């Protein structure tokens, strides 16, 4: 279990608020294939900043509003890149985004958007975040970005409304699988309890994230499980655009599958390969005591957490197979290419 004794950088949090207050419009782009923490945390900030007279709106960067997150307060106010008109903004606030390249089509269409010409407030809990903001509030031992945001809002003197508490609890539950991962600490649990005391309801969060699945998700998982393969101790499967189309599924509906695969006896890491226009987006997971998948992902230009990480494979079938082969060697503690991924 991670130590609960991290401490918020109060000076950076104060400076972030000063900068946010001076902005005319704050845009909060989410990471691609946004999950509960990645959307709920900026939504909590959106609601909190309104108390400060600040206009801040999250932007889903890859054109998909996840249906399973529709219970989040403020969900209907989120902008969709490529669908809604992009507002004129003078500040970016990026929450739960370890790398600017993870901003989906928003980044791919114009990397200069996040080059630094527009100031960036960077709030994150990924160990691989390189501090790309003019203000960086990064705490890798926080269980979720929402846990970190909860401390920031307390420092700002935010009124913890039921809506804000609901968003923050959803972010914590999403990244800890309902307070079950080894990143969950006593501090995480106390924060969750405080949010429930403020009016947050765990029931719709648990239902939406872990219990209730649309038929399209069951179809997607069925097809993915039929194609499960092993490369060494890496268990993996692939999801193509055609599979999503056949099942009528959204990209986010495949996300829980990697955790399901990880529970397979004999696996030291699990991966889902999502085919895209440039190759494959890879989602990686590992169990406590096994391979550090953040270190593994960084070998291929990705990043994340020791137990949950991701990367992009550029190219075709040969590049995919090269990744799988080398990843298997890294997991086994062997790397012909000379790099290493380590166990914790």
Image (cartoon, rainbow, N blue to C red):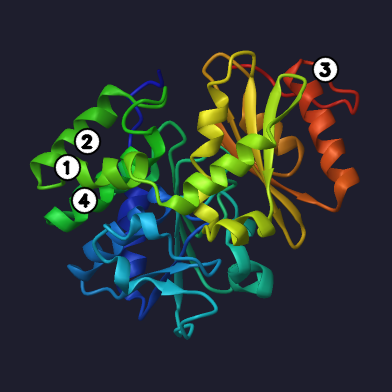
Residue 193 in view here: yes
Residue 110 placement, left or right of 207: right
Task: Point out residue 112 in the picture as x, y percentages from the top left corner.
Answer: 66, 73
Task: Point out residue 17 in the picture as x, y percentages from the top left corner.
Answer: 30, 61
Residues tagged 3 and 4 counted as in contact (Cβ below 8 A): no
Residue 202 placement, left or right of 255: left
The disc placed on residue 195 is 1
For marks 1 and 4, give the CA distance.
7 Å
Q: Quadrant of residue 201?
A: top left
The residue identified by callout 4 is 166
> In front here: 162 or 242?
242
For marks 3 and 4, give the CA distance.
45 Å
Which residue is at a point 84% across and 29% down the rendered structure image?
Answer: 325
Residue 306 in view here: no
Mark 2, residues whose alpha carbon is within 10 Å: few (<14), some, or many (≥20)? many
The number of discs equals 4
The residue identified by callout 2 is 191
Where 78 falls versus 175 (above or below)? Answer: below
Mark 4, residues whose alpha carbon is within 10 Å: few (<14), some, or many (≥20)? many
Task: Point out residue 171 in the picture as x, y percentages from the top left corner.
Answer: 34, 46
Tell me the element at label 3: loop
Residues tagged 1 and 4 counted as in contact (Cβ below 8 A): yes
For marks 4 and 2, give the CA distance.
12 Å
Tell me the element at label 1: helix
Which residue is at a point 48% across and 55% down the rendered structure image?
Answer: 34
The residue identified by callout 3 is 334
Residues tagged 3 and 2 counted as in contact (Cβ below 8 A): no
Mark 3, residues whose alpha carbon is within 10 Å: few (<14), some, or many (≥20)? some
Q: Quadrant of residue 221?
A: top right
């Amino acid at each position: 279990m991670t130590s609960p004794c991290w401490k918020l950088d109060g000076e950076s949090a104060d400076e972030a608020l000063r900068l946010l207050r001076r902005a005319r419009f704050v845009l909060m782009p989410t990471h691609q294939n946004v999950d509960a923490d990645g959307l709920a945390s900026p939504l909590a900030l959106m609601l909190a900043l309104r108390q400060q007279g600040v206009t801040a709106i999250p932007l889903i960067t890859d054109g998909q509003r996840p249906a399973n997150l529709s219970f989040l307060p403020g969900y209907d106010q989120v902008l969709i890149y490529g669908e809604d008109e992009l507002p004129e903004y003078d500040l970016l606030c990026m929450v739960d985004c370890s790398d600017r390249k993870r901003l989906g089509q928003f980044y791919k269409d114009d990397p200069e958007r996040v080059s630094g010409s527009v100031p960036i407030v960077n709030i994150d809990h990924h160990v691989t975040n390189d501090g790309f903001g003019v203000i960086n509030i990064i705490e890798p031992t926080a269980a979720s970005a929402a846990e970190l945001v909860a401390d920031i809002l307390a420092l700002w003197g935010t009124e913890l409304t039921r809506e804000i508490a609901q968003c923050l609890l959803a972010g914590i539950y999403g990244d800890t699988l309902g307070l079950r991962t080894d990143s969950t600490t006593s501090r995480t649990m106390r924060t969750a309890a405080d949010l429930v005391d403020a009016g947050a309801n765990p029931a719709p969060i648990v239902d939406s994230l872990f219990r209730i699945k649309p038929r399209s998700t069951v179809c997607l998982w069925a097809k993915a499980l039929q194609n499960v393969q092993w490369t060494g101790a890496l268990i993996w499967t692939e999801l193509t655009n055609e599979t999503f189309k056949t099942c009528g599924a959204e990209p986010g509906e495949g996300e829980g599958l990697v955790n399901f695969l990880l529970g397979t006896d004999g696996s030291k890491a699990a991966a889902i390969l999502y085919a895209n226009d440039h190759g494959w987006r890879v989602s990686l997971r590992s169990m406590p005591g096994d391979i550090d998948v953040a270190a593994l992902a960084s070998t291929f230009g990705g990043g994340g957490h020791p137990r949950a990480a991701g990367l992009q494979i550029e190219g075709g079938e040969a590049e995919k197979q090269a990744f799988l082969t080398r990843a298997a060697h890294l997991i086994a503690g062997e790397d012909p290419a000379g790099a290493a991924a380590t166990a914790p």
